[in-house]
Structures are given as structure tokens and as C-alpha cells.
Image (cartoon, grey):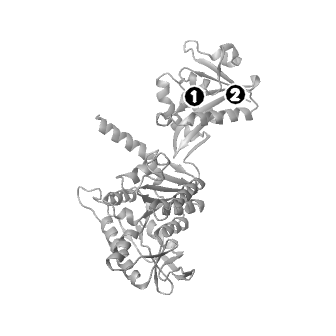
Amino acid sequence: MRDNDAALVKAFRQSSPYVNLHRGSTFVVMLGGEAIDQENFPNIISDIALLTSLGIRLVIVFGARPQIDRGLEEAGLAGLFHKHTRVTDEASFRVIKDVCGGLQMDIMARLSMGLINTPMQNARINVVTGNFVIAQPLGVDDGVDYQHSGRVRRIHTDTIHHQLANGATVLISPIGFSVTGESFNLSSEELARRLAIELKADKLIGFCSQRGVMNESGVAIAELFPEQAEEHLQRLLAEGDTMSGTARYLRAAISSCRAGVPRSHLVSYREDGALIQELFTRDGLGTQIVSQSAEQARQARIDDIGGILDLIRPLEEEGILVRRSREQLEMEVDQFTIIEKDGAIIGCAALYPFPEEGMAEMACVAIHPDYRRGSRGDMLLHKVEDQAKKRGLTRLFILTTRSIHWFRERGFEPVDVSALPMGKQKLYNFQRRSKIMMKDLV
């Protein structure tokens, strides 16, 4: 098999857990006007089409800030803002409705493509739009009348769910309608936030110019809790960045996460395939705001046996770990702690207590090769140490052939076979000649 083919097969296999995980889920996708302006936008549409073919229920909300600004400039109208919110007078609103109507038609046209030799071939996406959002005016603030600028009053969630259940992709414009027969210009970020919350969406997805929220070294931060995201938002605001896609999206994502949306993702609208890599690879390519970490350590269950075997078999074949049968693992699964990320087991360790001697063995320590540079080993060690302490055990030992220095750096000291519990001494393999390391638990 050629290297390129092997890489394709590996990537396809690694994506399968995420295909299964996302099927039947509801995603709210926030397409800002900046994303629509990009040369990469046709690729984004193709990736959205791929999501629908994988059984994901999509609600697409589009924005139009740069397009509206250009339309107003061409019409000779000044863009008026108050507290970073557009003031929409009658003349401006006529332009805005024309711009949003045109964008809605363009997006629907792109989602309707089915040309041979394109990613959209045989897509057949049923796009539905309508008066799903009831709006009301923002009113007057500090003497400034926002006129046709509005806010979301109510969302017909039952109607949207009905459309999604029938296989439709729902496209929603930033124009809302009131019970009095008027229409209002809405914030697309606020609209997407409300939709994600009220539809009880599984994800809110947005786009920005960079890979996501960047750290001081210019690297995208893979995962943030709402409190951490709030700190980055305040930093952006302090720098005067109030209107960028990152700042606007973070505000919506933080609020959504706190209201129960499990994960919100921010990806680049410039990088081809960023959305697919974010959703269908273990490490992603953007930033996600999460209510709880995608990576957690927990006690193993019987249905984790297959994942543990997949993790430890390569190490057993190399002679690093002692071989364990499936039957043995099934009997000992309660002794295992695993690290799980998005349904995949990327780390494991077992604790075997010897209560009469006040000792315990930490064994079968394994970390997936893609994650060995992180702190997963320390996470497992701390979990195992805590379990041993709760059982009233005072010493922890390991037998290792390859990780001697790693354990030395964490307080383990070399000891002789005679220091082991009697039951373990009888099982010690003198041909394997594993180093014995022990640590006092304080």
C-alpha cells in the first residue's frame, strides 16, 4: 500500500468513531459574512454538505456584516452604530433586506449543487427556510432609537425540529419577523446562540480568520472552559477588538455553553477542511468551548475491554507489557483506570492491591503514541495513587523495563525482589528482569 493510501485509510478509520458519535446530532452552524466572502467558502459549503450526508441535522445561520457595509457604501448611506450595535433606519433597512435576501439565495443555490466531479455530486440537500424566528425591536437606549434593529423574542423550535426530522437542512436569515407584521435586523451571533440553546443543540459552530482562540505563542488552544474563554474574550475587548469574528463568537459560545450546549467550536474560514478536521479527528484543528473536558480519566467498564486491548496489544507485541487475554481483562476490568477522549481510550493503568502488606502494584500502564508528550501518564499515576490511599495502602510499586527514569522522576526508588509482597515474589519473572520501583504514599 502506498504511503498516501495508507494515510487515507488510517484517517478514515480514525474518523469512524466521530461519524457514529455525530449521526443524529443537531448542529447550529454560524456562517458570518466574513466567511461567505472568502475564496474558501465553496469548500465550507462542500463540508457542510458532507455533514448532512453523515446524518447530522443542521441549522445554518448566516450573517452579512461586510456585505451590508458595502451595500450601504454603494447606496451612499452611513453605517450608524450605538454601543457596537447597528442602528437600522428605514433607508438602511431596505439595503439590508436586499443584501440578506441575495445571500440567502446564493447559499441555497450553492447547497443545491450536484455537478459531476465535484464534492457536491449526488448531495441532494433539501434546504428549508421560513419565518421560524419571531423578533421584537431593540427600542430606545440613551436616547438612540435602534428603529429596525431587533432581538429574538421567540423561536418556533417545534417547527424547526419537524423540518430536521424530515431530513431538511434549515437555513435562517438574520432578518426576523414580529407579530405585528414588521421585520427586524438581528445579530447573527445572538440568533445562533438562541437557536443552539432552545433547540438543545449538540454543538454550536462558528468561523473566524484564525484557527481558533490563539495563545501567546500564536498556537490555537484546543479546549477552553467557559471561565477560561471569558478571560480571552476580556483580553480581546481590552485590545479594542469588539467586532471580530473571534470576539463575537466567543460571547455566543460562552453563553451557549453555560446554558447547556455541550460543545461550541471555532474554526478557520480560510483553511480548507478545517471544519472536517475539527469534527472528525481526535485533536481537531480549532478551539472548542466545553462544559466538561473532552478528555477524562475514569474507572473502566466491561464495554471498554475492546478499547483497552487495542491500546495495549502493540506494547505487548513489543514485549513492553505482559500479555493479557480478553478473559483476564474481563475479570480484572474493575482494577483499570482509563483516559477517554471522544469515546476513544487513549490511556490505561491497573491497580492490584496487596492489602495484607499495605502495598499495591501499578501495572499495564499504556498511553496511545499520539498522546505521549502530554501529561496523561501523570494523570493516571495520580488517579492510581488516590485509589491506593483510599484503600489505606501505604506503598505503591511498579515493574518496568523501559520507563525507569520516568518513575524515578516521580518519587519511585529501585528495590530488590525481596521488597515485594510474597504473592508477587512468587510470580516475578527472572527472565524478563523487570526493574522494581517503589514509592511511599504520604
Q: Amino acid at mark 2?
A: Pro
Q: Is residue 292 left or right of residue 266?
A: right
Where 260 sits versus 72, above or below? above
> What residue would you read off at disc 1?
364
Q: Is residue 197 left or right of residue 218?
A: right
> What residue would you read off at disc 2?
353
As drawn, the residue found furthest toward the left would be 116
Question: Which quadrant does the N terminus fall into?
Answer: top left
Is residue 331 shown to the viewer in this render?
A: no
Residue 45 image offset from top left, x and y in percent: 34, 60
Residue 271 image offset from top left, x and y in percent: 36, 52
Dot 2 alpha-carbon crowd within 10 angstroms: few under 14, some 14 to 19, many 20 or more: many
* Residue 258: quarter of image: bottom right
Q: Amino acid at mark 1?
A: Cys
Is residue 10 shown to the viewer in this render?
A: yes
Question: Which quadrant does the C terminus fall into?
Answer: top right
In this view of the protein, which residue sits in the foreground, 233 or 78? Answer: 78
Where 371 sits versus 168, above or below? above
Residue 191 image offset from top left, x and y in percent: 49, 70
Where 19 sits versus 75, above or below? above
Classify mark 2: helix, strand or loop.
strand
Circle nearer the N terminus (2, 1): 2
